[in-house]
Each structure stands twice: as structure tokens, then as C-alpha cells.
Amino acid sequence: MTTHLVTGAGSGIGAVLSRRLLARGDDVVALARDAGRARTIAEELPGATVLVGDLAQPGRLSWALSKQQLPQRIDSLVHVAGVVDLGDVGDLPPAIWEQQLAVNLIAPAELTRLLLPVLRVSQGHVVFVNSGAGLRASPGWSAYAASKHGLRALADALRAEEAQHGVRVTSVFPGRTATPMQQRVRQQEGQDYDAGEFITPDAVATTILTALDLPRDAHLTELTIRPGR
């Protein structure tokens, strides 16, 4: 049985990916920020196992996971969760920077570190769902883009370090995707939200599955996805 640990499984890309993995008979372990959210995700994803760990507090992840039963095998760790708050550099207080760096960069690094021993045994796959902002920064996107540029650097270094253990690492860079996060972004931009203008979460999930399902003799390192219209 193939086991996947997915962050951000409660909505958007993570939820669609988790449902598709469960539908094909794979095991899904979802990470929720608190017990209440864990109950909701368990109801929405029948058959999934849910762990609790707050990505906004990466320094406490080790303690949180040590109190729970982790899977003995993990074939893939898929980092989907993220937060975004827009604002010009001249207006963003340290708390906004700290939150986005914690959730979008430091927590993925720490969660990966904690699970690497298991991933090495299974010669698993780490997937970082990044963003177009991880390739270029636009006005108002400095903090989010910095966290995503850092996430790309994390993936590149991890890929080189873990090749000797057979661990594969893929970065996925979706353009704007029709998710609840995108709705919040459009509100922050003062713009209307039209899901039809954006990539569907299912398309991004398909891309992630493509990377995960490749035979061992191939390794997709980076994938960029843009809206088709």
C-alpha cells in the first residue's frame, strides 16, 4: 500500500489530491492545524488518517508529532498548505513576514526534516507545491514571493542532498488556481473572483500525480502550470 502525507488537505488543491489518492486505493495521512480542524478533515476525507500539527508554529511540530502515531512507511510527502497576505514592502509589519515564512517555508523544511528517516527507507518523494511567485516577484507580493523563492531553494538543496538515498524532490509552480486562497487574494487585490479565469485544482492535482507516478528511472524536478485561457 502506498502512503502519502499531505498538508493543506482540507481545501483546494490538497483536498482534490487527497480524494483522488483515496479513490485509487492509496493511504492518505492529512495534517491539520488543530483538533477541531482534524475532525472536519476526517469527515470530509473518509478513509484518511489525520494528524495534528500547526504549521504556523514549526518549532512545535516535533513535539506535536511525537505525541501521535506516525505511519511506518511514507512514500510521498506533499506540501500543499500555504498562506498569503499582500502588501507593499513599506507597509508590511514583521508579523506578516514571520507568518508567511513560518507556514510557507520553515514548516515545510522542519516537517521534511522530521520525516526524512522514513522517506529514505521507502525511497520516497517530496513534492513542494510552490507558486508562480516562487519564480518572480510582483509589486505587493514581496513576503509571499520571498517565502516561495526560499521554498524553491529548499527543494533544490534537498534534491541534491537526498539523491544518494533515492529520495526524489519535485517543485510544482502553479499559476493562479481556483481555490479559497485565490478568493482571499482577489479580495485583497480589490478584484472580483471568477473561478473560470483560473486553473482548476484538479489540473494541479493531475500534475502532482504525474510526478508521483513516474517510474523510478525518471524524475520530474520542476513543473510550471499556467492557465489555458
Image (cartoon, rainbow, N blue to C red):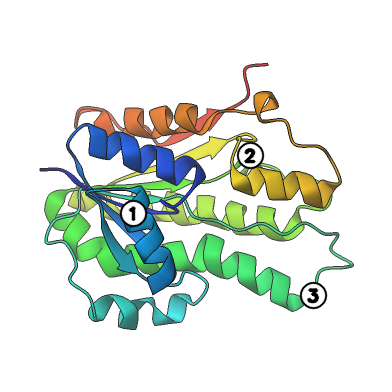
Q: Position of residue 68 (x, y in %)?
A: 22, 75
Label 3, label 1: how far apart the Cα atoms are: 37 Å
Q: Are marks 3 and 2 in contact (CB under 8 Å)?
A: no
Query: Label 1 is placed on what type of residue?
Result: Glu
Which SS class for mark 2? helix
Which residue is tagged 3? Answer: 93
Classify 10 as above or below 13.
below
Which label sits in the foreground, 3 or 1? 1
**Label 1, residues with CA under 10 Å away: few <14, some 14-19, many ≥20:** few
Dividing the picture into quadrants, the one containing residue 72 is bottom left
Direction front: furthest residue = 43
Residue 70 against residue 77 in the figure, above or below: below
Q: Is residue 219 above or below residue 155?
A: above
Residue 123: in sight, yes or no? yes
Q: Amino acid at mark 2?
A: Gly
Which of marks 1 and 2 precedes in the sequence? 1
Q: Mark 2 sits on what residue? A: 132
Q: Residue furthest right?
A: 90
Residue at screen point 51% across, 43% down: 12
